Image (cartoon, rainbow, N blue to C red):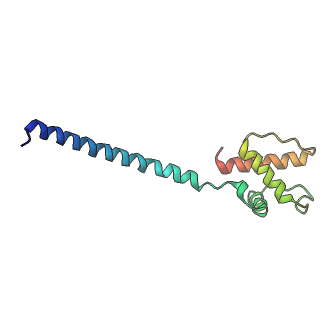
C-alpha cells in the first residue's frame, strides 16, 4: 500500500514528464517552419547554364553586345553566380567596363534572390 506522500511524488513526476514532453514537442513545431524555409531556397548555381541565362533575362539584366552568342556564355554567367553565392560582396575585375557592370548587375540580382 502506497502512502499519500508517494502518490503525490508519482503524480508530480508524471506532471513534470507531461510538461517536458509538451515543451519538447512545441520546440520542434516552432523550428520546423524555419528549417523548411531554408530547405526551399534553391541554389541558383545548381541551375543549368541555360537556366542561369534565363535568370538574368528575367531580372532584366542587360547583356553586353555580342556575348549572348559566345560559346559557354551560360557557364560564364553561372560562374559569376557561384562567386556571389560564396562571397556576396565579391569584387569583379574583368578587363572590360561593360563586363564589370554586367557582373555587378548579376551580383545585385543574386543578392536580392537570397535576401542579402
Is residue 62 something that shows in the picture?
A: no
Residue 9's spot in the image, x, y percent?
A: 17, 37
Q: Residue furthest left?
A: 1
Q: Is residue 21 above or below residue 47?
A: above
Residue 93 position, x and y percent, is 87, 41
Closer to the camera, 3 or 57? 3
Q: Quadrant of residue 63?
A: bottom right
Q: Residue at x 80, y 51 (%)?
A: 79
Depth order, front residue of 113/16: 16
Q: Quadrant of the C terminus?
A: top right
Residue in the picture at 86% in, 45% down: 100
Q: Nearer the viewer, residue 8 or 94?
A: 8
Report the residue that reaches farthest toward the top.
5
Residue at horizontal 88%, vertical 48%?
A: 99
In the rendered structure, the answer to whether residue 27 lies left or right of residue 100 reads: left
Q: Is residue 83 visible?
A: yes
Side of 33 where 14 appears, left or right: left
The residue that appears at 84% across and 50% down in the rendered structure is 102
Where 1 falls versus 32 (above or below)? above
Residue 106, given in percent of the width and then of the height, sits at 77, 50
Image location (x, y in percent) of residue 25: 37, 49
Label tally: 0
**Image quarter in which the N terminus is found:** top left
Amino acid at each position: 500500500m502506497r502512502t499519500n506522500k508517494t502518490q503525490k511524488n508519482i503524480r508530480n513526476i508524471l506532471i513534470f514528464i507531461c510538461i517536458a514532453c509538451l515543451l519538447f514537442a512545441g520546440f520542434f513545431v516552432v523550428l520546423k517552419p524555419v528549417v523548411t524555409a531554408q530547405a526551399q531556397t534553391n541554389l541558383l548555381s545548381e541551375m543549368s547554364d541555360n537556366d542561369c541565362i534565363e535568370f538574368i533575362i528575367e531580372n532584366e539584366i542587360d547583356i553586353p553586345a555580342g556575348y549572348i552568342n559566345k560559346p559557354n556564355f551560360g557557364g560564364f554567367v553561372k560562374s559569376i553566380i557561384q562567386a556571389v553565392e560564396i562571397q556576396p560582396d565579391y569584387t569583379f575585375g574583368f578587363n572590360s567596363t561593360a563586363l564589370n557592370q554586367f557582373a555587378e548587375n548579376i551580383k545585385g540580382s543574386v543578392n536580392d534572390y537570397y535576401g542579402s
